Amino acid sequence: METNWLPRVIRLKFVGSAWAAASRLAAVVAVSFLIVLLPHRAIGGDDVEKWIDQLVARESTIAPTGLFNFLAWGVEPATDFLPLREDHEPPSGGAENEGDPALKLIKLGPAAIPLLLAHLDDDRPTGVGPFGRVYLSDYVDMNSRSGIDRPLREGKRLSSVPDSNEPLNGLNLTVGDLCFEVLGQIVNREYGCVFQACMHCSVVSPGRSAVIRAHLKKSWGGISSEGHRESLLRDLRAPDSAERQRGAYYRLAYYHPEAVEPAVLDELRRPYYSRADIRDFCQDSLFTEGDRETRRKRVTDYLLSRNETYSRGLQRELWHEALERRISAGAEDAQAAEVAREVLVDVFGEVIGRDSYDRSLESDTTSESRSEFIASLTHDRSRAIGNMVAGLLESEPENNTIAAACLRCLANRGYPDLLTRAIDRLKPDVFDDLPSDLSILVACATSRDEGVRKRLEELALTTNQGAYLVAAMGAVAKENDGRLLERAVAWLDDFPPDKAEELGVLRAVSARFPDQSLAITEQYLKTRSPARVAAVCEDIDDESDSRILLLKPFLDDRRPAVYLSDDLELRDVVARTMSSFVDDVVYSSQDSEEERALTIQKLWAHYEGLAAQHENEPAEVPAAATK
């Protein structure tokens, strides 16, 4: 391990108190001690300091885009764990590449925590920002069911903290703020700095709040690798959301793989209830005719035939009926709400009132949340987990939600026969309806097994079902591209021109064959149907997509765009799409006729110039696919 880092600590560029410098020096020593124990390349405290220094150059947040929610609707914990981003969709603004210092810090894990905490007051501005109309917030995420986490301010949830009502302007995140976001990635907390609302930003900035810094240091200061593992295990066993549980699994699999199998097996053994089953019972039996004694007996019989989780699940549904869904509803719904209140009182002994509702009911395991958890189990290779999930698949083959989750989990664990049997049960001859079992195929398509992918390829090249074609397209080998292109173009030709193509075939085939996408789309538009024009508009998301030039002839098309709205003309849809890629040109269907005509003239001129730059003729569509 390198030992030449000590002089650099003394030469730190920060302007701060002697105490701050001393605390960072202590953190470097602690980090170096922890890192020497890690079973990979020796990384010194100097490396960590260098990576933190490099955060100055970042121009985007580390936290996922899920943070940019309207504050009125709250904030859900994120599950995007950046080191595993190859296997689930990376968030916009996340770590970009293997050389990203933020990603390196996250990969280092709990050993990086001491220096991250020590740098929370690092006020060097980064390239993230500037943000206008900023209110400082004291929202710090926590697992409300862990039994360990405590809110930043007891009795308060989310608040903005301006001492005055005047917003800040021109605010950039600091290095300390980004250290806060990195910390959240490591410890499975939604530590994000920027929350975008309608007219302003709320920013959580530990660098500007001694209260937040003290809270974080109290929560995570001195945590060991073992303590980190136990924290993640609590998140897995007692999550306050499905997202929290999945996030715990991802981090356990990455940082503490030895802890995954026993924890996951214990979780999979826990019973769960089906909200759909409970809703059916309520609508078909409980809310029908009968007196209070009859309903009490119906509830008793129903719960005796189900596992123990259904009692709390039924309470949750009844509270929802009594307090939420039936408010200001019709007479029939109002009666159902009254029945729900009666059952809560007669069977469960509840006192009706908003303050009486037990919010922990929201965190119980449902079949839906169990499915999401099973589908996330893709980062370990435990045979015991695979066997248990395979058993669940065999026990509920008709439940598409559970089956798809199990197949996603098993896709690369060595169970190819289960996947091929699932593919063979599909009905590939249906033409344009969205199949209810599409999730089954999507799960199987994640498999890397050669036999499974061969079966997927056969399906893609023969199916009449557009959704299946899109889902299985990735398994088609390059040598069969010609057959795939013919199949896709033929499907598009046969699709009813007056219907909206919402299965994604045009988008998928254009992405797979970019050199032919212009010709494919041109042929698709030969019918000039409003539905097809609108579909192409939705498919184009970049001006560099040359297919946008095919929309120019429709700029003066006054036919109704009935596919989207009775109030829109086709020119409105086309002009809105084309104007979105032109600076200083904004088209609105609410403008006057004169204003719309002027904007369309500008668009026509702009795209005439753009068309002159495209000298190459579109590639030919295979003759076998044309009519």
Image (cartoon, rainbow, N blue to C red):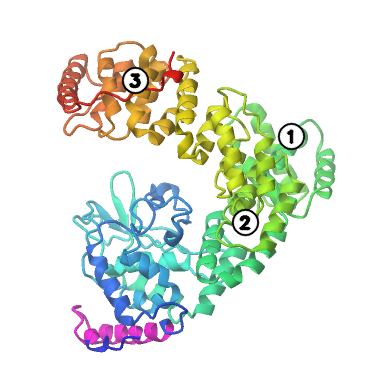
Whole-percent x and y of residue 396? 74, 45
Q: Earlier in the sequence, mark 2 or mark 3?
A: 2
* Placement of 597 over or under 278, stated as above or below: above
Q: Which residue is mark 3?
A: 522
Tell me which segment is drawn in magenta: 8-34
Q: Which residue is mark 2?
A: 413
* Mark 2 → mark 3, Cα distance in angstroms: 43 Å
Q: Residue at x 20, y 27 (%)?
A: 614
Q: Earlier in the sequence, mark 3 or mark 1?
A: 1
Q: Which of the 4 quarters of the picture holds residue 538? A: top left
Are the residues tagged 3 and 1 within 8 Å (C-beta)?
no
Q: Secondary structure at mark 2?
A: loop
Give the crowd class for mark 1: few <14, some 14-19, many >=20 residues within 10 Å: some
On the picture, is 387 further left or further right than 65?
right
On the picture, is 64 further left or further right than 133?
right
Q: Which residue is mark 1?
A: 287
Q: Earlier in the sequence, mark 2 or mark 1?
A: 1
Q: Main secondary structure of the magenta part?
A: helix
On the picture, is 285 further left or further right than 244?
right
Are the residues tagged 2 and 3 within 8 Å (C-beta)?
no
